[in-house]
Amino acid sequence: MNAPISRRTVAASLLAGAAALGTAGAAYSAPAAAADRGPGSPHGRPDTPTVVLIHGAFADASSWSTVVERLQRQGYRVLAPALPLRGLASDTAYIRSVLDSLTGPVVLVGHSYGGAVISQAAADDPQVKALVYIAAFVPEVGESALQLTDKFPGSTLAQATATQYYPLSDGGQGEELVIKKELFRKQFADGVPVHTTQVMAAGQRPITLAALQEPATAAAWKKIPSWYLVATEDRNIPPAAERWMAERARARTVTVRAPHAVSVSDPGPVTDLILSAARSVRSGH
C-alpha cells in the first residue's frame, strides 16, 4: 500500500483534476509524458490495456481524478466517461458504446453502482480482460443494487437521501435520489476535508430509483478475472455485503479502512489494485 497521503494533497489533487475534466464530466488521457512514466512503464507495448473508470451514483468522473493522474504516470491510457445514471440497461448500452470505440485489451473498473454496469457491459466483450470493483455492486443475474444493499445490515443511505422528480418523455415524472448536502460528508466521504466534500456534494450526480431497482441481465464476473476493494467504513453499501460479493465472484480482494468515496479518500490503494489487474492482463495471468 502506498504511504499515507495528506488531506491537503488529496483535496488539491481532486480539485485540480476536476478542473481538468471540464464540464463534460469525462476524462480522456493521452499517453503520459516521458518524464512521468514510472519504472517499467508499459507505454508503447501492444498488450498494454486501456483502463476505463466508471463512477457510481452521487459522484461524477472527477471522483477518479487522482487515480487517473497516477495511472497516467505509469504510462496507461485512461478513460473516465460520465455515466448517465438513468437505468441499468441504458447505462450499460452507453458504456458498451464507449468500449466499442476502443482497440486492444481493456481493464474495466466500477465504483458503487458502476460495478453493476461493468458486470453487464463486459458480457461477451472479448476486449475486457479484467474487472475491478471498488466498493461496488457485483450482481448475479436477476439481482438489483437495492437488493444487494439490503442483504446485510449497515447501510444508512435511505435516511441520507432525498427524492427529486424529473420529467419523462411520455409526460410523466421519474424519481431520482440525491444525498442531502448536510449529510453528504458523513454518508459518502467521511474523513475527506470539508471543503472538498462541499464541492463533491454540489456536483453530485442524481441516480434514478429505477436504476437501483433494475435487475441485472448479465454477470461478466463469472468468466472474467475480477479484483475487489472492500471499504470497511462504507455507509452506502454494507462492508459485509462487499465481502460477500467479492467472495462469490472469487475476486482478488484487498481491504481498506475508508468511506464509500474511497477513490477520493485513498487513491493509493485504489490505483494499486487497478495496476495489479492491468499487470495481470499484460502478463497473461
Image: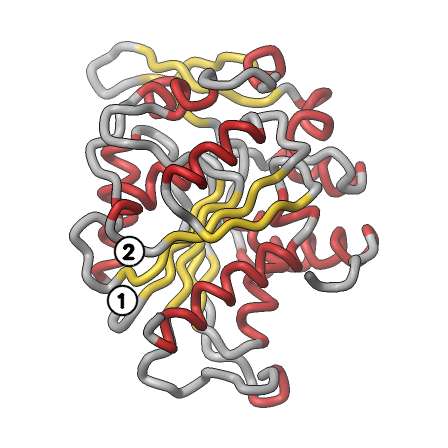
In the figure, is residue 80 to the left or right of 178? Answer: left
> Do labels 2 and 1 touch, CB within 8 Å?
yes
Quarter of the figure that contains the C terminus: bottom left
Q: Secondary structure at mark 1?
A: loop
Q: Secondary structure at mark 2?
A: helix
Task: Report the disc number at residue 102.
Answer: 1
- Of residues 165 and 103, the one drawn nearer to the viewer in this rendering: 103
The residue type indicated by label 2 comes to Val
- List x then y, in percent, for residue 55: 47, 44
Query: Is the N terminus in the top left, top right, bottom left or bottom right quadrant?
Result: bottom right
Q: Position of residue 276 (x, y in %)?
A: 50, 65
Residue ID at (48%, 27%) = 206
Q: Which mark is residue 150?
A: none
Image quadrant in which you'd find residue 3 = bottom right
Query: Is 83 displayed left or right of 276 in the figure?
Result: left
Eyeballing the image, is 61 above or below 128?
Answer: above
User: In the displayed structure, does residue 138 sit left or right of residue 59?
Assistant: left
Residue 14: percent from the left, percent from the top? 67, 53
Frontmost residue, 15 versus 226: 226
- Crowding at dot 1, Cα within 10 Å, few <14 / some 14-19 / many 20+, comes out as few
Position of residue 253 relative to residue 275, above or below, is above
From the viewer's side, name the closer residue of 135 and 208: 135
> Can you tell which quarter of the image residue 281 is in?
bottom left
Residue projecting furthest to the left: 124
Tag 1: amino acid: Leu
Q: Residues within 10 Å of mark 2 (few under 14, many from 20)?
A: some
Residue where numbered disc 2 is placed: 98
Residue located 39% across and 14% down the image: 175
What separation in Å lies between label 2 and label 1 (alpha carbons)?
A: 7 Å
Residue under the point 38% across and 23% down: 212
